[in-house]
Image: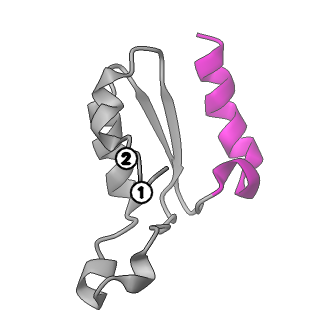
Amino acid sequence: MIFTQPVVYEFEKIKCPTLLIIGTRDRTALGKDLAPDAEQKKMGLYNELGKQTANKIPGSVLVQLDNVGHMPHIESFSRFLKPLQAFLNK
């Protein structure tokens, strides 16, 4: 889907409460290994991408977990769970 139906252009259409939880150590980027070295350094910077995405989703909440990678719900479940529970209890 990420290649055939990119959703990045539809973030501003999201109307429901939205929580984004990201790991700032995440550098995942599909196709990164195929990009030139200079471009690879710009790809998968979720500490920046998270902020950009939150700015596009009206009223969204962004939680950045320092020193956590691509799977915060597995790598640091307790740190993931706390903001999730707080968001759901609103």
- The overriding secondary structure of the stretch rendered in magenta is helix
Q: Where is residue 21 in the image (x, y as percent from the top left)?
A: 54, 41
For disc 2, the marked residue is 6
Q: How far apart are marks 2 and 1 (CA)?
A: 6 Å
For disc 1, the marked residue is 3
In the image, is residue 84 part of the stretch drawn in magenta? yes
- Name the foreground residue: 67 vs 38: 38
Residue 22 sits above or below residue 36 on the image: above
Stretch in magenta: 71-90
Q: Left of 50 or right of it: where is 65?
A: right
Q: What kind of element bears circle 1? A: loop
Q: Residue at x 50, y 67 (%)?
A: 28
Q: Left of 88 or right of it: where is 53?
A: left
Residue type at numbered disc 1? Phe
Residue 47 sits above or below residue 60 on the image: below
Label 2: how many Cα within 10 Å (few below 14, some 14–19, many 20+) = few
Residue 88 sits above or below residue 75 on the image: above
Residue type at numbered disc 2? Pro
In the image, is residue 21 part of the stretch drawn in magenta? no
* Residue contact at pointers 2 and 1, CB within 8 angstroms: yes
- Name the foreground residue: 27 vs 14: 14
Q: Position of residue 49 (x, y in %)?
A: 34, 52
Q: Where is residue 73 in the image (x, y as percent from the top left)?
A: 70, 47
